[in-house]
């Protein structure tokens, strides 16, 4: 992603656990040897992109930040800290400020929010009701492998097994992602509520989500019904979204064109389609369907976009040793 | 289904096109020879269960009814006729009346409505927002075969093809079922609105639906957010649903128990779970997830249940020749 975006890095260094240290991996910047993670070693970098567990991030991100590293963290460890920005560059780049720890949002939130934001600015979000269709990649590379392997097993034997997922996923769905909370929602569902509020700066936004894992590989889809403060039309929404960064209007039903994982996978832009006046909320209501790559806008792309904002805003001052 | 329900039939006769006539098929009532469909032949029966296209039903159901046959039609041909009942026996059995043509509802509607009805009676439905996760079986046996065959092809070659569906379905989803209407909704989505209103007798019910085909075989799932006229609690809803016919509460998240196609397939009851107070509608709102067998409550089971109502209500008079 750094190479695809032509991120102007002087050196790429890769860190992992002691178990992986010493292994080599091919990158667009040449063959790289993986180094063992230590605070001292990573502290030599300007920017650290963390793709680690929340517990690891909680322990080490503050230590790196104290040493002057700008940490962009993909875990949920810091997303709800009032003093840590949670950033989608198309929405709230200014929130980056001079923070040394910046949180990268939940994938489902990022894919939805980038489509909601231009509509919010124009019409004012009032209520948002979301149901998701989430890919196996949300559970990591192991999740993607389990889906493929167990789909094969199911086709051969009529039975599928599970280790990564709570139940067999092929030819099934699982309405359970992350831990259940006291209010009956899962943490994944509440992340969409909490993070959408923080990123868009609407602390009282009424948003509910049902998060469902389905047997797709790496693009999440979401159905959203929205009530706005002001009247809205599908045409006006389509025109706004057509000009919005990070989204692509894919909405020509007569030609069987609408967002689908088949097309959204591997793309930077979140696809938005099935835009129609919602039957429940009438002229203040809109219904739409979004689909975005869980590994790109839902993770790596957004993290690198945050790094671009950091570079853009801090420029020369980033090189602490300068 | 007739045999499973011990329907007290004196004789089962099977009709199809001239192309299939003369073929034999094994049934729980013995080996049956398929007869060519003619009005004269079918008019010898008391009840005709039609599983044919809407066009065929429109042409022949009235002719059969005129000959005294009670027709239970699985197509959408008569569902919106004011003088034809559209029946889910758990909800509106009395609507059967003395009608000679009775419509069997859309599968997605039947699976949802059977869970909504007990809640409506207690709390009053006001707004219902639905997103569906629909199985390949909704497109017939060809749809189920295409999903399996193309899943194999995808796993072997990385590519899937499509004939039955508008796009390849394995490891994908398709937010498009039935034809698009002028208002941007598909006919499948509007069926859920129109049929729910008629069956439950709430002509102004505000209900919207996003209907999505996903790569599952034969059970439809649906996410529903509901605003009620009166305050509601998840516990009260759970207690009501536990006593309601046709539904089974499957709602123990801590034990990873919730509705899933894996378990709902082959079952008569519609599974209801993930019951929680909805964040958007507060103490008047509920959110839940349902899953039911598209071929059973979504089709054959409901049709045979209608036949049971007919038999129960008309008893002796059914035998017109008597």
Image: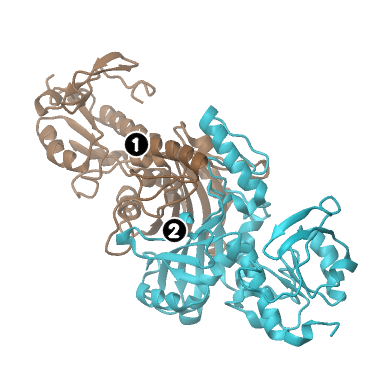
Chain colours: A brown, B cyan
The furthest residue to the top: A30
Name the disc covering residue A142, or none.
1
Q: How far apart in space, not on screen, are marks 2 and 1 (Cα)? A: 30 Å
Q: Is residue B61 rendered to the left or right of residue A202? A: right
Residue A190, image quadrant: bottom left
Do labels 2 and 1 touch, CB within 8 Å?
A: no
Q: Nearer the viewer, mark 2 or mark 1?
A: 1
**Res B60 label:** none
Direction front: furthest residue = B30
Give the labeled residue for mark 2: A129
Chain letter behind tag 1 = A
| Residue B46: image location, x then y, percent | 79, 75
Position of the C terminus of chain B, as image quadrant, is bottom right
Q: Nearer the viewer, residue B285 or B28?
A: B28
Residue B316 against residue B21 in the figure, above or below: below
**Residue B281's image quarter?**
bottom left
Tell me which residue sits at (55%, 62%) in the image: B208
From the viewer's perspective, tell me whether residue B173 is left or right of residue A168. Answer: right
Q: Helix or strand or loop: what does disc 1 sit on?
A: helix
Residue drawn 36% across the image and 64% down it: B279
Residue B203 visible in image: no
- Viewport quadrant of the N terminus of chain B: bottom right
Query: In front here: B31 or A179?
Result: B31
Instruction: Identify the secondary structure beneath mark 2.
Output: strand
On the rendered structure, is A39 left or right of A248? Answer: left
Q: Is residue B95 above or below residue A17?
A: below
């Amino acid at each position: 992603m750094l190479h695809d975006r032509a991120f102007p890095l002087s050196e790429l260094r890769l860190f992992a656990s002691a178990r992986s240290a010493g292994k080599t991996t091919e990158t667009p910047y040449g063959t790289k040897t993986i180094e063992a993670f230590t605070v001292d070693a990573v502290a030599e970098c300007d920017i650290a992109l963390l793709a680690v567990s929340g517990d690891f991030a909680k322990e080490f991100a503050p230590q790196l930040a104290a040493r002057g590293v700008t940490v962009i963290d993909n875990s949920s460890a810091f997303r709800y800290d009032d003093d840590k920005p949670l950033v989608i560059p198309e929405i709230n780049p200014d929130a980056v400020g001079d923070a040394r720890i910046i949180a990268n949002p939940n994938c489902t939130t990022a894919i939805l929010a980038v489509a909601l934001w231009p509509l919010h600015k124009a019409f004012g979000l009032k209520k948002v009701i979301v149901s998701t269709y989430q890919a196996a990649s949300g559970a990591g590379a192991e999740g993607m492998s389990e889906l493929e392997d167990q789909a094969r097993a199911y086709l051969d034997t009529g039975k599928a097994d599970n280790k990564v997922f709570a139940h067999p996923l092929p030819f099934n769905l699982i309405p359970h992602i992350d831990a259940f909370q006291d209010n009956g929602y899962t943490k994944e569902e509440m992340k969409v509520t909490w993070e959408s509020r923080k990123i868009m700066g609407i602390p009282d936004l009424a948003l509910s989500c049902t998060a469902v894992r389905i047997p797709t590989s790496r693009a999440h889809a979401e159905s959203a019904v929205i009530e706005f403060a002001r009247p809205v039309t599908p045409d006006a929404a389509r025109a706004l979204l057509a000009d919005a960064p990070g989204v692509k209007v894919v909405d020509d039903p007569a030609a069987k064109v609408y967002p689908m994982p088949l097309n959204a996978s591997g793309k930077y832009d979140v696809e938005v389609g099935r835009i129609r006046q919602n039957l429940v909320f009438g002229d203040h209501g809109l219904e739409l369907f979004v689909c975005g790559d869980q590994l790109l806008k839902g993770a790596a792309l957004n993290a690198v976009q945050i790094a671009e904002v950091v570079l853009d805003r801090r420029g020369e001052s980033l090189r602490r040793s300068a």
